[in-house]
Each structure stands twice: as structure tokens, then as C-alpha cells.
Image (tube, rainbow, N blue to C red):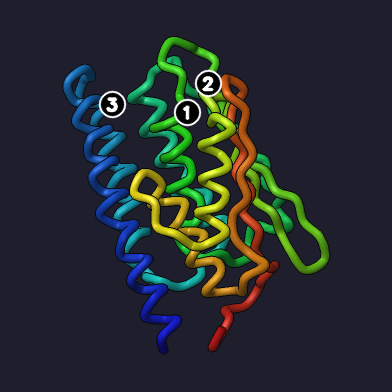
């Protein structure tokens, strides 16, 4: 019960954080676009809100999580027109595997908010997957600004100690949820080089049925 309470508390941090950022994207686009474009964005947003309100705090299929992420990335691609491209390479074999909801989108949000080079038209975000018999690693890579060695070391220590860091609430939230849900060997790993980009690795067990009493 204590773990579930902590999971619910961490989950509740994501929803308003995600809402405010998405609405800001739409606001900026509404200032510069025609109704057709705005209509598509509102459709995406409505779909994303529906996603956010069902099975709250539970596991969802990787396919559903990816669909949600594509809508978010489409919104951002409209906001940063001609500046952002994304690629998703997930084998169909694993799309029905289960992961905690809102595991990927906050990491993508970080990549865009902190990594996007606004003076470049070659920003790319890639989502990939590496699997063993019992575990999967979801990789989110960008070719953005990257993180300095000192900041990266500080971020890694914060993740290791499960510290809440105001500037990285999404990362800390996800890391804590994964460890509470699956155990200390799971969670996030981060690699980065300045001006080369950042890779976030999400390590979780392969699950094809809902986990009870974890």
C-alpha cells in the first residue's frame, strides 16, 4: 500500500507538468497558424488527454505509449516547423509488452525543451529498443545540445540516490516509479556529450500480463 501511494503521488506530478507544456505549444502555434493546423493539434491534444485519464497509474502497452508519444512529437514538430524530425524503430514483436504509463513522453519533453538546437534544421529524436530474454531497454536519443560532464555526473548521482531535482522532475519521477514498481536494478541511465546529444536508456522487465502486488 505504501508503494502504491508513492507511485500515485509520483504519477500525479506528471499530469499538470505535461498539461502546461502542451498548452504552451498549442498557444504558440495558434499565433502563427491557420485553423486547419490548429484543428489537427486540438485533435491530437484531445486524444492525449483521453490517454492520460484511463488506467491511471497502471501499465499500458508499449504500442499505446508510442502512439501517445507520436501525437506529442507531432505537436512539437508543428511548433518547430522544419526544425525537428523523429524516428521510431520498435519491433512489432514487443509492441504488446507492458510499461508504466507516461514513461517515455517526459523524456521526449526534456529532449525538446533542453536539447533542441533552435538554430539548426537537423534536430532528430530517435526511439529504439534492445531486448534480452527477460529485460528490455528503450533508448531515446537526440542530437541536441548535450549535457556538460559536471552536470551529467550530478544528474547521475541524483538518479542513483533517488533525489528530486527541480530542473529534472520528469526524469526523477520516472526513475523513482520504475524502481518502486520493479526493483532497484531497473530505472534510467543517461549518456551525453556537449554538442553531440543525449541518450536516455530505460531499463524494465519484459511484461506481457498485468503485474499484481509488485
How many C-alpha atoms fall within 10 Å of the one at disc 2: few (<14), some, or many (≥20)? many
Left or right: 63 in relation to 129:
left
Which residue: 39% across, 57% down? 164
In the rendered image, which residue does mark 2 sit on?
123
Foreground of the two, 138 or 162? 162
The quadrant of the image that shows the N terminus is bottom left
In the rendered image, which residue does mark 3 sit on?
37
Which residue: 33% across, 51% down? 47
Left or right: 68 in relation to 189:
left
Q: Is any atom of residue 149 visible in this view? A: yes
Q: Secondary structure at mark 1?
A: helix
In the rendered image, which residue does mark 1 sit on?
115
* Labels 2 and 3: the sequence-earlier one: 3
Which residue: 48% across, 22% down? 84
Left or right: 154 in relation to 34:
right
* Labels 2 and 1: the sequence-earlier one: 1
Q: In the figure, 193 relative to 134: above or below?
A: above
Q: In the figure, 105 relative to 114: above or below?
A: below
Q: Secondary structure at mark 3?
A: helix
Q: Residue 27's spot in the image, x, y percent? A: 19, 31
Q: Secondary structure at mark 2?
A: strand
Which residue: 37% across, 66% down? 10
* Labels 1 and 3: the sequence-earlier one: 3
Q: Residue 152's spot in the image, x, y percent? A: 56, 39
Evaluate if marks 2 and 1 touch, with contact meaning CB atoms under 8 Å apart: yes
Q: Quadrant of residue 63?
A: bottom right
Evaluate if marks 1 and 3 touch, with contact meaning CB atoms under 8 Å apart: no
Amino acid at each position: 500500500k505504501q508503494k502504491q501511494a508513492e507511485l500515485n503521488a509520483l504519477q500525479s506530478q506528471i499530469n499538470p507538468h505535461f498539461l502546461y507544456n502542451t498548452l504552451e505549444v498549442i498557444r504558440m502555434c495558434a499565433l502563427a497558424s491557420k485553423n486547419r493546423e490548429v484543428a489537427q493539434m486540438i485533435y491530437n491534444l484531445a486524444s492525449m488527454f483521453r490517454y492520460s485519464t484511463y488506467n491511471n497509474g497502471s501499465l499500458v502497452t508499449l504500442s499505446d505509449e508510442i502512439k501517445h508519444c507520436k501525437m506529442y512529437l507531432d505537436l512539437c514538430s508543428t511548433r518547430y516547423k522544419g526544425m525537428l524530425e523523429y524516428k521510431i524503430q520498435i519491433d512489432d514483436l514487443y509492441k504488446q509488452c507492458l510499461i508504466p504509463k507516461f514513461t517515455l513522453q517526459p523524456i521526449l519533453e526534456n529532449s525538446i525543451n533542453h536539447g533542441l538546437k533552435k538554430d539548426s534544421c537537423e534536430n532528430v529524436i530517435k526511439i529504439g529498443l534492445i531486448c534480452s530474454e527477460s529485460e528490455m531497454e528503450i533508448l531515446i536519443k537526440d542530437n541536441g545540445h548535450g549535457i556538460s560532464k559536471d552536470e551529467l555526473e550530478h544528474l547521475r548521482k541524483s538518479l542513483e540516490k533517488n533525489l528530486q531535482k527541480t530542473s529534472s522532475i520528469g526524469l526523477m519521477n520516472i526513475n523513482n516509479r520504475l524502481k518502486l514498481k520493479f526493483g532497484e536494478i531497473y530505472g534510467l541511465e543517461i549518456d551525453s556529450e556537449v554538442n553531440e546529444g543525449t541518450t536516455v536508456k530505460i531499463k524494465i522487465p519484459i511484461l506481457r500480463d498485468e503485474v499484481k502486488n509488485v
